[in-house]
Image (tube, rainbow, N blue to C red):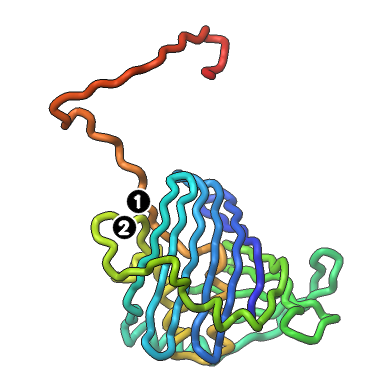
Amino acid sequence: LAFDYTAEVVTQGIRHTSGGSIWVDLGQRAFRLRGEAKNTKVGPLYMDLIANGGANPQVYANVNLTVQREQQCVAYDYPELSSNITGQLSTIADQGLAFYAISQLNGEDCGIFIAPLARGRWIHLWVDLEADNHESILRSEIHKNGQVIRSTDIQRWLSREDVPVSVLPNPSWGCTQDPGAGQLAHLGLNQVHKRSIELQDALYALRSLNHAFVVLEILGLTGDVAIMVQEPELPTLWNLPAVSFSYSLAVVPGDQEVP
């Protein structure tokens, strides 16, 4: 399956919106999530996350910072989770979806189906009752402690014929496992911490659990893959033995904006 989406995330009471696309190849246990965030500290950020949980498992993260004109793809070893966490995920995966309620979305009568995810989260799927295929899914919501923390609207379903190719890293990205000191961004897969734990749950599901739960976990990632971007460093002019430059000066009255 493959689709375009828009996601809205609430973080500390502030709403953030983003857009992207997802391709899922259940037969190969692989997926690709393309995300776009236009308002970050470093300007627009585009990311492609590819996970292959089948033979030769690997995770790839390709980051493109358009303002800095920088692009980098890093290949990660597939993460491992503790037996305690994997046991909990296996138990949750067996529960599946259950009917919850009927409501309306954009004028369409929808059935709402819910299922538990890891870490106390629940996914709510809004399904068009008049459709009879996977394209009947219109929205997914992630709930925790009775609050909607993330909402994803499916904008357009894409051709499934492109999925096998889409879940492979593009050779032009130049993916490497050792970017050195110049790594632009980090997924945080080397250790379990708050920023990456839900991604690691989804990666374990992709590799080891039933297909239905894999889809639910991947739907729970939209708009929420945390990537830590290296901010530009201030030039250390004071460390140079000598420096020379030309400059221009503008004096602006206090009641006017700086040009």
Rendering coords of residue 199 (x, y %): 44, 72
- Tell me, for residue 183, which label it has, or none: 2
Residues 128 and 142: in front is 128
Q: Is residue 194 visible to the viewer in this orientation of the structure?
A: no
Residue in the image at 42% along x and 56% along y: 71
Q: Could you tell me which quadrant the C terminus lies in? A: top right
Q: Which quadrant of the figure has residue 134?
A: bottom right
- Tell me, for residue 168, which label it has, or none: none
Query: Label 1 crowding class (10 Å Cα cut-off): few <14, some 14-19, many 20+?
Result: few
Q: Which quadrant of the figure has residue 61?
A: bottom left
Kindly state the secondary structure of the residue where label 1 is placed: loop
First in sequence, mark 2 or 1: give its number.
2
> Is 83 displayed left or right of 141 in the figure?
left
Residue in the image at 23% along x and 30% along y: 237
Q: Could you tell me which quadrant the N terminus lies in? A: bottom right
Please identify the residue farthest to the left as the structure is shown.
241
Contact? badges 2 and 1 (CB < 8 Å) = yes
Rendering coords of residue 118 (x, y %): 48, 77
Kindly state the secondary structure of the residue where label 2 is placed: loop
Residue in the image at 38% along x and 79% along y: 58
Rendering coords of residue 155 (x, y %): 72, 66
Inspect the image, locate mark 2, and give the three-letter code of the amino acid beneath it: Gln
Q: Exactly how many numbered labels are in the figure? A: 2
Q: Is residue 126 visible to the viewer in this orientation of the structure?
A: yes
Residue underneath mark 1: 230
Query: Label 2 crowding class (10 Å Cα cut-off): few <14, some 14-19, many 20+?
Result: few
Inspect the image, locate mark 1, and give the three-letter code of the amino acid beneath it: Gln
Residues 202 and 3: in front is 3
